[in-house]
Amino acid sequence: MITGYVIGESLRPGAVFEPRGLRLRKVSRVEIGGASAAQPPVWTLVEWETDSEDVGALAEALAGALEPELGWYADFTAGDERVVVFARKVFRYRRGDGAGRAEAVAYGRSVGTPGHQLDWEE
């Protein structure tokens, strides 16, 4: 089972994220105290899951749907693998791999993700 979330506001206008077998788990709206000045103060969190084993296709679908401005990203787990997806860029590493995580964090900083938002769970 693959589980993850995407922030609704992180999707490009006109983008569609609809991989085969995707199931909605929960949609919620939260006020973000740590949003950057360019980000909206309220985010829509869309939690999803799938039984698909095609991690690459799922990651590429997200990479194609995310807005490249402001360093938006989405992440998900697939077994013992952590997948962190930015617009047009995918990082995959074994959970707990500090070097893999550091590479994704460095990339996030380079594209404008506020450092305190690079906080995905392992």
Image: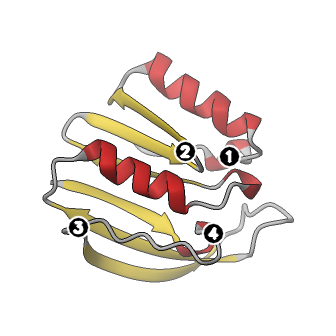
Q: CA distance from mark 4 to mark 1?
A: 22 Å
> Badge 2 local density, few (<14 within 10 Å), some, or many (20+)?
few
Q: Earlier in the sequence, mark 2 or mark 4?
A: 4
Residue at 32% x, 49% y: name it.
57
Quadrant of the rendered image containing residue 109: top right
| Callouts 1 and 2 close, C-beta under 8 Å | yes
- Viewer-proximal residue among 73 and 98: 73
- To which residue does mark 4 refer? 12
For marks 4 and 1, give the one nearer the viewer: 4
- To which residue does mark 1 refer? 116
Q: CA distance from mark 3 to mark 2?
A: 28 Å
> Badge 3 local density, few (<14 within 10 Å), some, or many (20+)?
few
Q: Which mark is residue 13?
A: none
Give the secondary structure at mark 3.
loop
Question: Given the image, on which type of amino acid does mark 4 rest?
Answer: Arg
Residue at 24% x, 44% y: name it.
78
Q: Point out the image quarter for the N terminus.
A: bottom left
| Callouts 2 and 4 close, C-beta under 8 Å | no
Q: CA distance from mark 3 to mark 1?
A: 32 Å
Quadrant of the rendered image containing residue 67: bottom right
Q: Which mark is residue 20?
A: 3
